[in-house]
Image: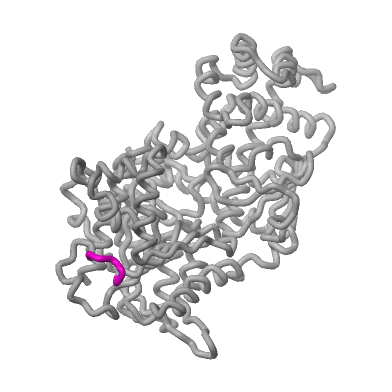
């Protein structure tokens, strides 16, 4: 028994060291300005990722190509990147005003631009976490591309297998019949070291409306560029623009973003009112407040949770528009992001809502005491500190310094759970920062008992704020779960939010010291369970109930405060 424990702990320590090496290396490469992912300069990143073997990347350390991990990465990188030798990470440098059409990955809000046949530019406006995210995904992608290369090159002269020649011939065809497609997938399965069943199952998940054969093309281009690297030494290169290196860490986008909100609050005489900041999505607060008013007919026959599920259905645009119209006519202002943060905002003047949310005392309150809700869309990693820090700073208006009258900050988000499944709820009592000794205990206004009794498992304890979800490793997570830290889940923003709140309230005096905080997360995945990682797919309707249970409780506490 002792030996097993020692082996497990050693593996966790190795994984921790691998993460530290990756982040030190990424910072070094960023400062250097460029690197070759499959050259000597990218060797430490490759070795560390293979040592770590993150759960989300499945079989990265085996010879067969990892399909679910590949899908996860492709959905977060721009279409066509697999064809590019030169990948340039830039700041917002004016490409939006050019002839280049922005390419936005389906699962990451970032603008990318295909400059020519060989170059892809990726705009980074969300801080270091975004750079770490991109570099980790690129490292995985290029490791997989060299697996393909090793399976198709026969000799040092670059001769290739029959399977590769057949795949190349197939993707050159303008259209394929079902028979031709299955033949091509058979050859592709041999190249990938996967079964025909595995390949045919994953094939449709890569489809986009303008390209049904995208899976075959991605495999071909990954292999083609890896072959070119090996035979002709034409290495793929990642560069960081001088402007990005100069701007990173200076809160340029966060300041513009925060000032747009504060300008609206000042101009509408809302700055002195009790302000409640909520980090959430752009639908749950609006739907919770206004669907009972806008959808009275629908609610007669259905429970509120059923209505929320209907509103979450992509085919029910008419219902959503009805709720949004009601919200816009009754005190909601939507502020679309123009700063580059990719964080939209909503401001709710609750004095303009006919009925308060489940609060008997609401209507009798003077207008100046009725809350103003500032809802911000999700931040990404370290960007949470930048945006919250800037939002809580006083606003300079006509030579005056105006402080926000912040009563509470509520954070609702998705997180990985360590003991439970998708859709379960986590209530944190502290955030621990992975890879450091930093820890942030706090008094959470939300309690486990507030959300129990609704048919959903609720757990409470500490949460780890991780450096990147792509790097999570089973051994590290098991260690945290079984240690005295009592860790129940992992996410990317908690420490950064709390650091900004604590410095604003306790150190800098920007907001009152007794500001209330609420944190609650619903589980998007369980990285300790095979088949339940983020690469296994989205939540679907599983996330609807926990999202609205948390939202209802947050609003209930705000209106009753």
* Span of residues in magenta: 351-355
Residue 206 shows in the view: yes
Specify whether 254 is left or right of 440.
right
Specify whether 92 is left or right of 474.
right
Image quadrant of residue 4? top left
Specify whether 120 is left or right of 359.
right
Residue at image location 43% in from the left, 56% down from the top:
465
* Of the pair 53 and 360, the residue shown nearer to us: 360
Image quadrant of residue 123? bottom right
Q: Position of residue 373 (x, y in %)?
A: 35, 68
Q: Quadrant of the C terminus?
A: bottom left
* Of the pair 18 and 427, the residue shown nearer to us: 427
* 27 vs 76: above or below: below
Residue at image location 57% in from the left, 49% down from the top:
133
Q: Is 301 one of the magenta-colored residues?
A: no
Specify whether 354 is left or right of 96.
left
Residue at image location 54% in from the left, 88% down from the top:
398
Residue furthest toward the top?
A: 179
Residue at image location 51% in from the left, 45% down from the top:
470
Q: Position of residue 97 (x, y in %)?
A: 71, 57
* 289 vs 42: above or below: below
* Magenta stretch: dominant secondary structure: loop
Q: Position of residue 144 (x, y in %)?
A: 63, 32
* Of the pair 407 and 307, the residue shown nearer to us: 307
């Amino acid at each position: 028994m002792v030996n097993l424990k020692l082996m497990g702990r050693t593996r966790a320590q190795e994984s921790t060291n691998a993460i530290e090496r990756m982040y030190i290396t990424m910072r070094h490469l960023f400062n250097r300005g460029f690197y070759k992912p499959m050259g000597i300069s990218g060797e430490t990143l490759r070795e560390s990722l293979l040592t770590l073997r993150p759960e989300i990347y499945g079989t990265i350390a085996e010879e067969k190509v990892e399909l679910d991990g590949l899908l996860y990465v492709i959905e977060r990188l721009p279409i066509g990147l697999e064809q590019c030798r030169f990948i340039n990470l830039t700041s917002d440098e004016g490409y939006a005003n050019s002839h280049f059409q922005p390419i936005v990955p389906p699962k990451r809000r970032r603008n990318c631009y295909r400059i020519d046949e060989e170059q892809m530019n990726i705009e980074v406006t969300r801080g270091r976490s975004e750079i770490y995210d991109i570099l980790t995904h690129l490292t995985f992608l290029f490791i997989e591309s060299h697996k393909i290369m090793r399976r198709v090159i026969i000799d040092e002269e670059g001769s290739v297998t029959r399977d590769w020649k057949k795949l190349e011939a197939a993707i050159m065809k303008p259209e394929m019949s079902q028979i031709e497609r299955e033949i091509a997938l058979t050859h592709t399965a041999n190249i990938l070291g996967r079964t025909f069943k595995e390949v045919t199952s994953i094939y449709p998940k890569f489809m986009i409306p303008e390209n049904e054969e995208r899976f075959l093309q991605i495999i071909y281009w990954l292999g083609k560029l890896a072959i070119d690297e090996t035979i002709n030494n034409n290495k793929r290169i990642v560069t960081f623009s001088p402007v990005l290196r100069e701007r990173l860490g200076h809160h340029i986008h966060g300041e513009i973003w925060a000032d747009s909100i504060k300008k609206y609050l000042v101009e509408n005489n809302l700055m002195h009112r009790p302000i409640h900041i909520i980090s959430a999505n752009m639908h749950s607060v609006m739907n919770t407040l206004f669907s009972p008013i806008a959808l009275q007919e629908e609610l007669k026959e259905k429970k509120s949770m059923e209505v929320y599920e209907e509103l979450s259905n992509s085919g029910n645009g008419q219902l959503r528009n009805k709720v949004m119209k009601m919200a816009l006519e009754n005190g909601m202002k939507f502020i679309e992001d123009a700063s580059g943060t990719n964080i939209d905002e909503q401001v709710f003047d609750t004095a303009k809502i006919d009925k308060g949310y489940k609060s008997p005392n609401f209507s009798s309150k003077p207008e100046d005491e009725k809350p103003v809700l500032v809802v911000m869309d999700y931040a990404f990693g370290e960007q949470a500190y930048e945006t919250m820090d800037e939002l809580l700073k006083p606003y300079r208006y006509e030579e005056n310094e105006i402080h926000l009258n912040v009563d509470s900050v509520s954070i609702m988000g998705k997180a990985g759970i360590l003991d439970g499944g998708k859709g379960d709820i986590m209530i944190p009592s502290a955030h621990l920062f992975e890879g450091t000794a930093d820890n942030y205990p706090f008094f959470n206004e939300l309690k486990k008992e507030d959300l129990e009794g609704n048919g959903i498992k609720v757990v409470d304890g500490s949460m780890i704020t991780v450096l990147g979800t792509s790097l999570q490793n089973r051994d590290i997570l098991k260690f945290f779960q079984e240690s005295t830290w009592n860790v129940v889940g992992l996410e990317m923003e908690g420490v950064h939010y709390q650091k900004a709140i604590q410095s604003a309230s306790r150190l800098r005096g920007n907001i009152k010291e007794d500001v209330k905080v609420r944190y609650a997360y619903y589980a998007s995945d369980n990285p300790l369970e095979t088949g339940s990682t983020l690469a296994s797919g989205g939540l679907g309707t599983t996330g609807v109930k926990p999202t609205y249970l948390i939202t209802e409780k947050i609003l209930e506490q705000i209106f009753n405060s």
